[in-house]
Image: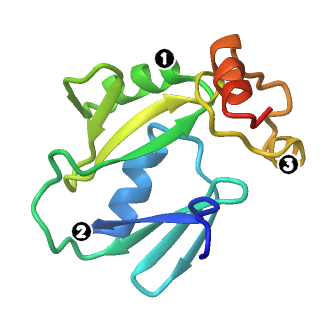
Amino acid sequence: MPRLVGINHIALEVDDIAAALEWYGRIFELREIERHLGMAFIDMGDQFIGFSEGRSQPPDTERHFGLVVDDKEATRRALEQAGAELVPSRGLDFLDPWGNHIQVVDYREIQFTKAPSILRAMGLEGLEKRESALAELRERKLA
């Protein structure tokens, strides 16, 4: 049987591509934005987020995805400054203006790992895992 390897991209529905790029650009450094008719693609090294114009569903409640960042507390401050709707949770969750529910996790604290060459190309070569994340990786025989 085929095995799951990872996630290549996430597609988010938004009402307006330009507004989404402006809003997310107040929170995150957006690099290499590629645009096509009704779509914008935000580079995250070997993955990407696609914004698709036209929200066709109500705001998310439990459905969400985890977005990995290099600094969760800096993200929290940027979200607060942007007036984002923070969702009560154990971590850092927010709703974007289009109702997409996003959970923010710090790269240093989770099992998710990017290859050193990808981190280097993203300008994140000094980003190191915390011991708790390394222990999880060792426990699963991934490190």
| Badge 2: residue crowd in 10 Å (few <14, some 14–19, many ≥20) | some
Instruction: Tell me the kind of residue under disc 3.
Output: Ala
Instruction: Tell me the kind of residue under disc 1.
Output: Glu
Q: Is residue 15 left or right of residue 138?
A: left
User: As drawn, which residue projects farthest toward the top?
Assistant: 131
N-terminal label among 2 and 3: 2
Secondary structure under the numbered disc 3 in the rendered image: helix
The residue under label 3 is: 121
Instruction: Tell me the kind of residue under disc 2.
Output: Asp
| Badge 3: residue crowd in 10 Å (few <14, some 14–19, many ≥20) | few
N-terminal label among 2 and 1: 2
Secondary structure under the numbered disc 1 in the rendered image: helix
Residue 53 percent across, percent down from the top left: 31, 75
Residue 30 percent across, percent down from the top left: 59, 50
Residue under the image location 63 percent in, 14 percent down: 132
- The answer to whether the residues at label 2 and label 1 have Cβ atoms under 8 Å apart is no
Vertical side of 138 occupied by 65: above or below: below
Q: Is residue 92 left or right of residue 4?
A: left
Label at residue 73: 1
